[in-house]
Amino acid sequence: MKLNLDQMTKRYGDHVVLDAIDLHLSDIRSLVLIGPSGGGKTTMLRILAGLEQPEEGRVRVNDHDLRCSEAELLAYRRRIGMVYQAYNLFPHLNALENIMLPLVQVQGIEKHQAKEEALALLERFNLAEHAFKKPVALSGGQQQRIAICRAVAIKPEVLFFDEPTSALDPEYTSEVLDLIEELREEDMELILVTHEMGFAHKASDYVLFISDGGIVVQGTPAEVFEKTTNPRVQRFFNKVLKYN
């Protein structure tokens, strides 16, 4: 995965969320964004996923220039997978139908083929017994794993996660993180916002600490978690790791 951001700036009204961000990365498989709430990491993720546009600067993900037309952005969005913290499953559809939907509606795959591919994914991720259950009959962890299956089904160029475990109990958090780690080991390209620091350390090739509209620290997991001397980052770790 290649990322190139040049003076990228994002505002909401008079509030500058990301201020003239420069970032140039290549050969990254798993990028993790961490930092305090409100620091800009989810906005960064949404821009990289083509869901929001910056007011200024250049944004390139792999060979896609994201300062482009709405039609080009739509084509890009069809090439990426997105997993949200609230699952976003359709409540009137069962697990199988939720996975089939983007294959049929977005990718244009015939229903019988989409069903075969969806069933294969459910089997692969040990979810086959839940294929015909609607979201209300599933635990939070099961719903999130179904949501991940749905995102993986389209064979995305990059898979994005926006705090995928923030609404889960610890038991279900482990299930979801194990699945994400499995995808990483299969060399899928991932960009992840998370508050799970242990997982961020383990699952990332590269880490961005984002706060106050900028990248405060960046580097390998060892550089960010073990070697940083930045006082802002150290205060954050002292708080979030205090009881871990």
Image (cartoon, rainbow, N blue to C red):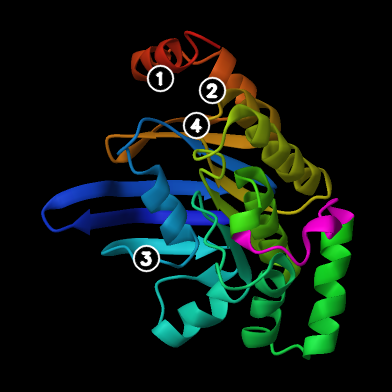
The first of marks 3 and 2 along the sequence is: 3
Report the magenta residues as a range: 124-135
Residue drawn at x 68%, y 37% is: 177
- In screen coordinates, is 211 left or right of 175? left
Which residue in the structure is indicated by mark 1?
Answer: 233
Vertical comparison of 2 with 95: above or below:
above
The first of marks 3 and 4 along the sequence is: 3
- In screen coordinates, is 217 left or right of 7? right
Task: Tell me where residue 175 appears, x and y as whole percent.
Answer: 72, 38
Question: Which element is circle 4 on?
Answer: loop
Q: Between marks 3 and 1, how big is the CA–CA gap?
A: 27 Å
**Amino acid marked by disc 2:** Val
Q: Residue furthest left?
A: 14
Res. 26 in view: no
Give the numbered dot on residue 195. Answer: 4
Q: Between marks 3 and 2, how big is the CA–CA gap?
A: 27 Å
The first of marks 4 and 1 along the sequence is: 4
Residue drawn at x 42%, y 67% is: 51
Task: Tell me where residue 200 appears, x and y as whole percent.
Answer: 60, 31
Task: Tell me where residue 26 appears, x and y as whole percent.
Answer: 63, 50
In front of the other: label 3 or label 2? 3
- Labelled pair 1, 2 in contact (Cβ < 8 Å): yes
Residue drawn at x 39%, y 55% is: 6
Question: Which element is circle 3 on?
Answer: loop
Which residue in the structure is indicated by mark 3?
Answer: 52
**Amino acid marked by disc 3:** Glu
How many numbered marks have been drawn onto this rendered protein structure? 4
